[in-house]
């Protein structure tokens, strides 16, 4: 066997899992198409995949998907800015005052496991049926991981770096800005990434639930109109947007911590 | 020679309440005082910040009525069912993906990226498939719960000590025995962790679905209180729900921890 054939074979085997994964999904859609077209699956419950594919263009053009996407992204980024400011500041404050950290860290951790998104009716009362309800819901639900990761990042600064700062007689503020904060930045970004993911999930969810805003409302709207193919297409669109969002955040994180 | 005249320091008695507890009490009292002040100030819309007394009264009323426990039972059953179905499916998928590198490369990235997508958007589809009853809430909870359990178990499966697997093979254990005797006991931590994450998202999935469309369950009671603008009742329900979910989370985590202590 020649080296070229071996190389070709190894390249093929490297792509084989991805091809199988993709092939399974395509196969699933083909089987569904067949089942729906033959009447074995009710097309008023599951529209044929070809119809869903066909309705993508209609949904994008008629339902103003781009402006809805921009709206959801703006809400998410606004929540993200608030998360970064208040979450990081909260984490730094808790690290600075150890007693405060000991008293409150378990509360913040408990908040992270509580179903905060269930407070959306409360936020509706406070902020009304507006974008602020959605933004604040995303912000509050995503705050705990940012605070916890900021504390973790600053506490995890290597002792040798702190000692270098001390040997240079740095003041408290210099020690923070020149040593602690830069060292903690990659971990803080992990927190911000988690926070942004939580924010996106909650923002789209609340948009869907209160029927207001961008992409979440689109799904609710289409479902209420019983436009099944459109609903499925909108769900696929939201999933694609979410995946792109996560991938972008991951890329930024990798860029920030190239050593790991 | 006997030691005489040596002074020994009597250890100071430990304070009854430590500084951390004191600070916690101070924070809680400050929050309650600010809350009460706001409720009487008239700065906010009436009833947006009801008085503590009104919330307390609503909580007592809530906890002494059978209706609340019935709805709590409905939600608990939905979440339990979702956790059971999603958990078992997640463990099975996780074992498959963790045991087979090829399958993992083929499908795990899909799970990884689908996992954090907002599951509530699937609710219209679940209503189509399962109707407006508790079944659609269970389905949404199951879908939410499946991903964290599967990903956690797959990662745990890859982390199993190879020696344990070789021991299983040397005893000629069949596939079922390998799962029951080797994989599951060796993966108890990732499984507990996955179940913990799964419990949280299943709870959120079921409750959010109840707030959207249902006629029973805690989510329904919360949205009902919102619709009738019964704010003290809504606050009371949210507080009880938060306490219950935090306790449930802690119990699952503690069970996992206790298990480890016994084994070590």
Image (cartoon, grey):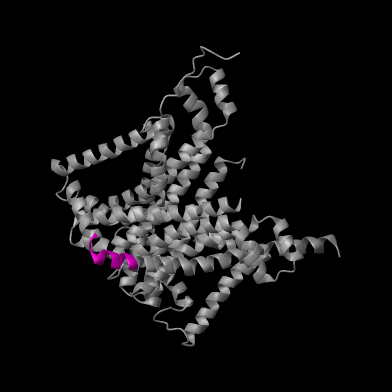
Q: Which residues are magenta?
A: B64-73
Instruction: Please report the residue visible at 60 percent of the width from the left and 53 percent of the height from the top.
Output: B263
Say whether residue A18 is visible. no
A87 versus A60 height, above or below: above
Instruction: Please report the residue visible at 39 percent of the width from the left and 45 percent of the height from the top.
Output: A143
Count the numbered circles shown: 0
Q: Position of residue A184 (x, y in %)?
A: 51, 35
Q: Nearer the viewer, residue A204 or B18?
A: B18
B22 versus A189 height, above or below: above
- Which quadrant holds residue A226? bottom left
Q: Nearer the viewer, residue A48 or A53?
A: A48
Main SS class of the magenta portion in the image: helix
- Rendered-image quadrant of the N terminus of chain A: bottom right
Residue positioned most to the front: B1
Instruction: Please report the residue visible at 18 percent of the width from the left and 58 percent of the height from the top.
Output: B229
Residue positioned most to the top: B5
- Which quadrant holds residue A144? top left
Say whether residue A161 is visible. yes
- Rendered-image quadrant of the C terminus of chain A: top right
């Amino acid at each position: 066997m020649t080296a070229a054939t071996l190389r070709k074979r190894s390249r093929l085997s490297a792509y084989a899992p991805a091809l199988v994964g993709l092939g399974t999904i395509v196969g699933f859609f083909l089987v569904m198409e067949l089942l729906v077209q033959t009447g074995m699956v009710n097309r008023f419950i599951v529209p044929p995949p070809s119809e869903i594919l066909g309705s993508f263009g209609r949904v994008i053009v008629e339902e103003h998907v781009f402006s809805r996407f921009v709206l959801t992204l703006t809400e998410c980024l606004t929540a993200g800015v608030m998360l970064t400011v208040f979450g990081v500041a909260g984490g730094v404050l808790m690290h600075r005052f150890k007693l405060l950290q000991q008293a409150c860290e378990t509360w913040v951790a408990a908040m992270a496991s509580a179903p905060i998104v269930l407070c959306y009716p409360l936020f509706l009362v406070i902020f009304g049926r507006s974008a602020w309800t959605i933004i604040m819901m995303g912000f509050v639900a995503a705050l705990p991981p940012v605070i916890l990761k900021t504390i973790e990042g600053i506490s995890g600064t290597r002792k040798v770096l702190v000692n270098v700062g001390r040997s240079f007689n740095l003041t408290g503020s210099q020690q923070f800005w020149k040593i602690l904060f830069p060292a903690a930045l990659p971990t803080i970004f992990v927190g911000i990434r988690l926070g942004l993911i939580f924010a996106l999930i909650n923002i789209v969810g609340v948009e869907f639930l209160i029927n207001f805003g961008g992409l979440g409302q689109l799904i609710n709207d289409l479902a209420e109109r019983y436009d099944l193919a459109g609903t499925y297409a909108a769900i696929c669109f939201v999933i694609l947007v979410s995946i792109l969002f996560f991938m972008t955040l991951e890329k930024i994180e990798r860029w920030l911590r190239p050593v790991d | 020679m006997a030691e005489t005249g040596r002074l020994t320091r009597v250890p100071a008695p430990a304070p009854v309440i430590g500084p951390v507890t004191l600070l916690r009490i101070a924070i809680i009292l400050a929050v309650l005082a600010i809350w009460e002040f706001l409720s009487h100030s008239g700065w906010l819309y009436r009833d947006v910040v009801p008085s503590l007394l009104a919330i307390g009264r609503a909580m007592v009323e809530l906890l002494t009525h059978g209706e609340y426990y019935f709805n709590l039972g409905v939600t608990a059953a939905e979440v339990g069912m979702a956790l059971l179905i999603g958990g078992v499916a997640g463990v099975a998928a996780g074992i498959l993906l963790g045991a087979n590198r090829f399958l993992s490369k083929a499908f795990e990235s899909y799970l990884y990226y689908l996992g954090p997508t907002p599951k509530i958007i699937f609710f219209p589809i679940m209503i189509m498939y399962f109707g407006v009853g508790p079944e659609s809430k269970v389905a949404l909870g199951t879908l939410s719960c499946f991903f964290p359990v599967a990903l956690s178990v797959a990662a745990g499966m890859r982390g199993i000590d190879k020696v344990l697997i070789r021991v299983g093979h040397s005893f000629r254990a069949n596939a079922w025995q390998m799962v029951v005797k080797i994989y599951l006991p060796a993966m108890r931590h990732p499984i507990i962790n996955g179940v913990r994450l799964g419990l949280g998202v299943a709870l959120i999935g079921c409750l959010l679905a109840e707030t959207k469309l249902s006629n029973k369950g805690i989510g329904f009671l919360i949205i009902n209180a919102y619709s009738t603008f019964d704010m003290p009742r809504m606050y009371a329900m949210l507080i009880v729900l938060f306490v219950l979910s935090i306790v449930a989370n802690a119990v699952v985590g503690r069970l996992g921890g206790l298990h480890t202590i016994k084994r070590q």
